[in-house]
Image: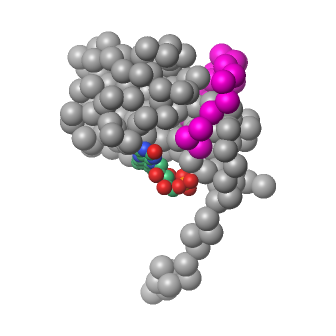
Amino acid sequence: MSPIYHRVSIRKYLDKPVDDELIKEVLRAGMQAPSASNQQPWEFYVTHDHEKMTALSEVSPYAKMLKNAPCAIVSAYRKNCRLPDYAEIDLSIAMENMWLRCDELGLGAVWLGIAPIEERMKGCEEICEMDENLCAFGILVIGWPAEEKKQQDRFEESRIHIF
Ligand SMILES: Cc1cc2nc3c(=O)[nH]c(=O)nc-3n(C[C@H](O)[C@H](O)[C@H](O)COP(=O)(O)O)c2cc1C
């Protein structure tokens, strides 16, 4: 089945590490995303460090699962990319690519919203010690799933407007 119809938000993880090679596969999918003018404005900060993830969990009220996760990827974009107005759109595509790839690899993941909320962005930028030129965008929390969920069917014929 296509991961589009299988991926769900997984917020509970087994106490089992995620191999770096798998994380690299996930990052490869992220970097394979299309972007405006092919600008590829992304940078990715990967951590397996419990203390760093606990610090990141304080950045947003909806990030508690980070405290019990084996791995997280914080995505960011370069402010001085060619088309900065499109950078957050480009990063969204990269995040979805990574989330879908996690699903294909049997990993469980959830996207945590950081941008455009400035306070959350600043928190991530400080914890990751990002360069001045970078803006934090989102966090993908990754682990081996410790919960099972079925995806909702969200198809609604009424949302389609033929003109
Ligand atoms: C931009 C974005 C931000 C999100 N932020 C959070 C978050 O901060 N915390 C969280 O637990 N889930 C977060 N989610 C996950 C959504 O709540 C989830 O995708 C949605 O409820 C649909 O469920 P599903 O992913 O299982 O299909 C976010 C998802 C997106 C796309």
The magenta span reads 10-34
| Above or below, 89 relative to 155 | above
Q: Nearer the viewer, residue 49 or 131?
A: 49
Residue 18 in the figure: left or right of residue 87: right
Residue 24 in the figure: left or right of residue 124: right
Asked whether residue 27 is drawn in magenta, I would say yes
Image quadrant occupied by the N terminus: bottom right
Q: Where, by quadrant of the figure, is residue 132 drawn?
A: top left
* Camera sees residue 38: no
Residue 81 on image: x %, y %: 31, 29
Residue 21 in the figure: left or right of residue 160: right
Render colour scheme: one colour
Q: Nearer the viewer, residue 7 or 34?
A: 7
Q: What residue is at 38 percent from the left and 25 percent from the top?
A: 56
Residue 87 on image: x %, y %: 34, 38
Asked whether residue 123 is drawn in magenta, I would say no
Q: What residue is at 41 percent from the left and 36 percent from the top?
A: 63
* Camera sees residue 96: yes
Question: In the image as oriented, which residue stretches furthest toward the right?
Answer: 1
Q: Nearer the viewer, residue 155 or 92?
A: 155
Residue 68 in the figure: left or right of residue 115: right
Image quadrant occupied by the C terminus: bottom left
Q: Nearer the viewer, residue 127 or 96?
A: 127
Number of marks present in the image shown: 0
| Above or below, 63 relative to 71 | below
Q: What residue is at 36 percent from the left and 16 percent from the top?
A: 128
Residue 156 on image: x %, y %: 55, 78
